[in-house]
Amino acid sequence: MATSGARSNALGGLGQWWGVLAGLLLIAAWINSAAGPAVVIALSAITVAWCLFQAPVTCGAPVRGRDDGCRNNASGLLLGCHIRQHRWQKLKMLILRRQVRQFCAGLFSDGKATTLAGVGSFVSGLVALVPGVVVH
Ligand SMILES: [Zn+2]
C-alpha cells in the first residue's frame, strides 16, 4: 500500500479513501438487485475492514489530564496513532469491560461518520446473509 510522505501526500490521501468507494459500490449493489448477495457481502466486508483499520480518524486513546484523549491522526477505529502505546490502550479498552462503554462513546463522538458507515455496512452484510431478505 502507499506509504504517506510529503512527496505523495495527494496520492496517499486518496489511497485512504478506497473504503468510501467500496461503500458507494455497496449502496449501488443494494439499489441494483442484479448484483446479488455475494457482491453485497463482499463489499460490506471491505467497507467494515476499512472503517476498522484504515479510515482517517482521531486516535482518541485516553491521555492523562485530557478529557477528549489523544488528538493525533490515526488509521481505523480499532488502531491508535503512531504512538505504539496508544494502540495497546485502545485494544485494552475493548477487553476491559468497564472501558468498552468509554471506547464506544469515543467512537460516536470522534469518528461518527466512520462509525455509522462501519455499523451500516456490517448490518448490510448480515442482512445479505439471511436468505429471502434480499429481493431478486
Ligand atoms: Zn494517540
Image (cartoon, helix red, strand yellow):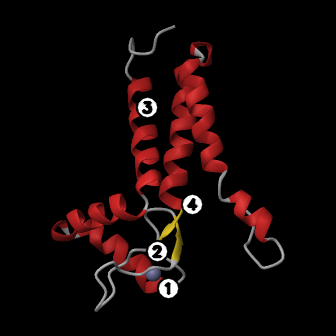
Circle 4 sits in a helix, a strand or a loop, which is it? loop
Task: Tell which residue pokes out farthest to the bottom in this image.
Answer: 65
- First in residue order: circle 3 vs circle 2: 2
Pointer 3 residue: 124
Is residue 59 toward the left or the right of residue 90 in the image?
right
Which residue is most to the left? 98
Other-residue count near label 4 (Cα within 10 Å), few / some / many at <14 / 14–19 / ≥20: many
What SS does tag 1 mark?
A: loop
Q: Amino acid at mark 4?
A: Gln
State the SS at label 2.
Answer: loop
Mark seen at residue 80? 2
- In percent of width and height, residue 132 lies at 39, 11
Q: Earlier in the sequence, mark 4 or mark 3?
A: 4
> How far apart in space, not on screen, are marks 4 and 2 (Cα)?
11 Å
Q: Quadrant of ligand 1?
A: bottom left
**Viewer-nearest residue: 16 or 110:** 110
Q: Which residue is mark 1?
A: 83
Mark 4 or mark 2, earlier in chain: 4
Labels 2 and 1 touching (C-beta < 8 A): yes
Looking at the rendered structure, the kind of residue marked 1 is Ile
Which residue is depicted at the point 54% across and 82% down?
82
Query: Do residues under tags 4 and 2 come within 8 Å of each other at their CB atoms?
Result: no
Give residue 24's position: percent from left, percent from top: 61, 36
Give the residue type that dot 2 points to: Gly
Image disc number at residue 54: 4
